[in-house]
Image (tube, rainbow, N blue to C red):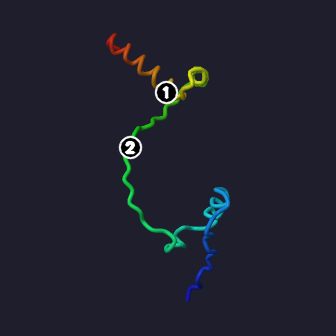
């Protein structure tokens, strides 16, 4: 007959995110089926994000421009790409 595993109770409250993370790093949620309940969630994608490789020197320039303008690197990169693509469309590239 298999022995029942002793489970440490889930604390009513954690003092910090770190304490909660440590607890769940060492425990499995599937061992506590009564502690959780399914929820319905309705989500929608607002934006997609793409990752591209760029050279280090280009990244440094983007960071500098973004910092100066109070924007994110992604915003500056997207703006520059849109501008360049619009110009190349006019030229027929």
Q: Residue furthest top?
A: 91
Residue located beneath label 2 in the image: 45
Q: Secondary structure at mark 2?
A: loop
Query: Count the marks: how many?
Result: 2
User: With 58 as the anchor, is 90 left or right in this view?
Assistant: left
Counting from the top left corner in percent of width and height, residue 88 is at 37, 14
User: With 62 as the anchor, is 85 left or right in this view?
Assistant: left
User: With 17 as the anchor, is 32 left or right in this view?
Assistant: left
The residue closer to the viewer here, 12 or 5, is 12
User: Could you tell which of marks 2 and 1 lies nearer the N-terminus?
Assistant: 2
Rendering quarter of residue 11: bottom right
- Image: 3 above or below 41: below
- Image: 82 above or below 3: above
- Do the CB atoms of the residues marked 2 and 1 lie less than 8 Å apart? no
Counting from the top left corner in percent of width and height, residue 92 is at 32, 13
Q: Are there few (<14), some (14-19), or many (20+) residues within 10 Å of tag 1?
A: few
Mark number, residue 75:
1
Counting from the top left corner in percent of width and height, residue 47 is at 41, 38
Disc 2 from disc 1: Cα separation: 18 Å
Q: Quadrant of the N terminus?
A: bottom right
Q: Secondary structure at mark 1?
A: helix
Q: Are there few (<14), some (14-19), or many (20+) residues within 10 Å of tag 2?
A: few
The residue closer to the viewer here, 51 or 63, is 63
The residue closer to the viewer here, 25 or 92, is 25
Q: Residue at x 38, y 50 (%)?
A: 43
Counting from the top left corner in percent of width and height, residue 56 is at 60, 25
Q: Residue at x 35, y 14 (%)?
A: 93
Mark number, residue 64:
none
């Amino acid at each position: 007959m298999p022995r029942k595993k002793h489970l440490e109770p889930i604390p009513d409250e954690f003092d910090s995110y770190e304490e909660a993370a440590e607890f769940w790093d060492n425990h499995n949620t599937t061992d506590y089926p009564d502690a959780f309940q399914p929820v319905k969630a309705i989500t929608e994608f607002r934006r997609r994000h793409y990752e591209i490789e760029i050279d280090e020197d280009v990244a440094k320039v983007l960071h500098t421009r973004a910092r100066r303008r109070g924007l994110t690197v992604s915003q500056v990169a997207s703006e520059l790409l849109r501008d360049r693509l619009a110009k190349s469309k006019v030229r027929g590239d």
